[in-house]
Image: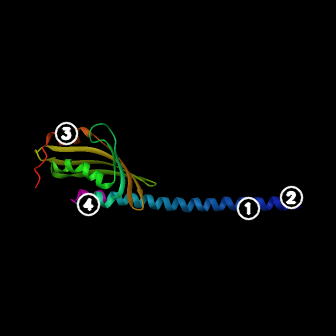
Amino acid sequence: MRKLKTGLLVGNFLAGLILAGAASSSALASQNAEAEARNGQFISEAFDRWAAGGNTFFNDVLAPDVVWTIEGSGPSAGVYRGRDSLLAMVKPFADRLAQPVRPVSKNVWADGDHVIVRWAGVARARDGQDYANDYVWIFRMQNGQAVEVTAFLDLAPFDDVLRRVPEPPAN
């Protein structure tokens, strides 16, 4: 009889653990789905503001200590540690544009703490030639900011602007 009671107690205990785990997993899945939706919406809205003429995208989205990786080869590829480091790398490019790059189309997917954006951007360089590029940026979000970003783009047109267009005179 004692063995039977012990068996029932262990069985009930294990069943309780399984049920608690299932409830916990369900609550965690719900929290993850909410965070995923929130992250996707946050990035999508930041792109919409940028497309509409906003100029605070990088400050709005990136954590100050973000790690931004530009995949590929060429002078602009590499790892940039910190928002200021990334912006310092982008500044010579931006200075050679008559108008800033603006997103003209985007698709956004969120998966857990990652948000993937495929977007097309256009601008006009100071020499009058158009700049157009397609991008894929993968954001890893934490506490409402991107802490890691991996960027894919065709670096040839980007680097061409840097080579072709003279740096504007300092004011």
How far across and down, in percent of the image, does residue 14 sit? 72, 58
Tell me the tag on residue 160: 3
Question: Left or right: 43 with respect to 169?
Answer: right
How far across and down, in percent of the image, does residue 67 sit? 37, 51
Helix, strand or loop at label 3? It is helix
Tell me the tag on residue 99: none
Whole-angstrom CA distance, mark 1 to mark 2, is 15 Å
> Given the image, on which type of amino acid does mark 4 rest?
Thr
Whole-angstrom CA distance, mark 2 to mark 3, is 80 Å
Whole-angstrom CA distance, mark 2 to mark 4, is 69 Å
Helix, strand or loop at label 4? It is loop
> Given the image, on which type of amino acid does mark 3 rest?
Asp
Mark before the other along the chain sequence, 1 or 2: 2
Specify start and end residues of the magenta stretch as a single range.
Answer: 46-53
49 is within the stretch colored magenta:
yes
Mark before the other along the chain sequence, 4 or 1: 1
Whole-angstrom CA distance, mark 4 to mark 1, is 54 Å
Q: Quadrant of the C terminus?
A: bottom left
Tell me the tag on residue 3: 2
- Numbered disc in front, either 3 or 1: 3
Q: Residue furthest right?
A: 1
How far across and down, in percent of the image, does residue 166 sit? 12, 44
How far across and down, in percent of the image, does residue 92 sit? 20, 48
Q: Quadrant of the N terminus?
A: bottom right
Mark before the other along the chain sequence, 3 or 4: 4
Helix, strand or loop at label 1? It is helix
Tell me the tag on residue 56: 4
Q: Residues within 10 Å of mark 2 (few under 14, many from 20)?
A: few
Q: Residues within 10 Å of mark 1 (few under 14, many from 20)?
A: few
Q: Is label 1 in contact with label 2 (beta carbons under 8 Å)?
A: no
